[in-house]
Amino acid sequence: MAALGAGDGGAKITKASLHTSIRCGECHEKMLTEWQGSGHSQAASSALYQASRKAAGDASCDGCHLPLAGRLGASAPAAREGVTCDACHTLRKVTVVAGARRAEVELATDDMIRYGPLCDIKDHYFHRMGCSPLHRESELCAACHLWSRDAGGTTLPVFTEYSDWKAGPYAAEGIVCQACHMPGDTAEVAVGSPPRDDVPHHGFLGKTSRLRQNALGLKLTVVRDGAELVITTNVVNRGAGHFVPAGLPERRLALETTVLDKNLAIVSTSLREFGRTLTDDGGQPVPFYRATRLGPDTRIGPRQSSSSTFRVPAAGAGELRVRVVHTLARFFTDEVATTGRPDEVMIEAKLSLATLPATITVPK
């Protein structure tokens, strides 16, 4: 078995039966539209990936970001689409081997079978149906969301979403990745077929695209202590089966607290970041492709929380505003010379300081 997008020495397989997403969308329009708005569709084309790949100076990430390139050649239209329809629906086998740097993956790209979780669908003229229990299991996601790199003879975990899930409470309870990332919709599987209620959503961030926001909760408490305000925050991972933030090690959750006066002028600001840091031999934070060691890890695990306390001057304080923002570490954006996608606000809360002590919970 081969790594995704590899295993053929880089040579094209001329008999590969692969298509662009537009071709698939002729029958599966709903899935196409959802996928087009997802990170999977931008896996190879996003500014962040392009800048990171250039800064890293190698193509080691293309196996997951351009999974069909090894089968078709990098210039083929279907290959350029990143994690496209046929990248997932030709997945025949994924094997997670203990201690391995990545999962072993088998792609069936030389026939007309397309694999999926619905096992009562009949073959038709365009492709045959492959009944795949794998497509309802988290091991499917391990094909790319479990990856370590060789750092001078040391195996350095980089993408850990699968292993984090596997070691956590969601796996123990049988809650798989697809339950949150690809919930069932009532829809046609293909144009003209009768609607059914178990059609997986293909946006990968839930039906409303707010999976990240919905995973987090926040509780604020403010008391007065002499001339100071004591602000206690508790950020809760209430809905993610893996640590947050997830994915790229340089992802961060930034907890921003801002105290304003009665005229809404800023009195004070405080910041705390949550994330996972990889370092060089000297202990300095560096992008994962240059890292050799594990650094601090302040991510928040499934059903866990993290509390922070800030002490700020009470004089003139009228309102407290708190945001939790999904962002990127500054050292990373400086090196790859990109901001990636804009910062995404996960939670935003306001609390009047007219009467203390005061408490607010978001969501209520």
Image (cartoon, rainbow, N blue to C red):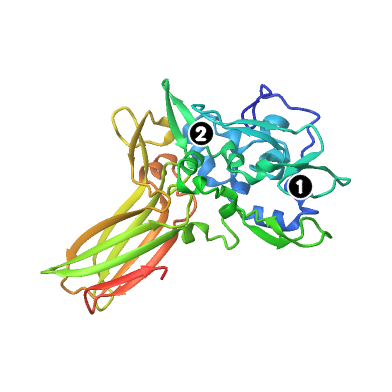
| Residue 15 in the image: above or below residue 32 | above
Residue found farthest to the left: 226
At x 34%, y 46%, the residue is 298
**Badge 1: few (under 14), some or many (20 or more) residues near its Cα, within 10 Å?**
few
Callout 1, which amino acid? Cys
**Disc sitting over residue 119 in the figure:** 1
- Quarter holding the C terminus is bottom left
Mark 2 secondary-structure assignment? strand
Residue found farthest to the front: 173
Q: Quadrant of residue 73?
A: top right
Q: Quadrant of residue 289?
A: top left
Residue hosting label 2: 147
**Badge 2: few (under 14), some or many (20 or more) residues near its Cα, within 10 Å?**
many
The image shows residue 31 at horizontal and vertical percentages of 70, 55
At x 63%, y 34%, the residue is 94
Please indicate whether residue 46 sits to the left or right of residue 322 in the image.
Answer: right
| Residue 261 in the image: above or below residue 231 | below
The image shows residue 295 at horizontal and vertical percentages of 33, 36
Residue 16 shows in the view = yes
The image shows residue 12 at horizontal and vertical percentages of 73, 27
Residue 74 shows in the view = no
**Sequence-wise first label, 2 or 1:** 1
The image shows residue 85 at horizontal and vertical percentages of 70, 45
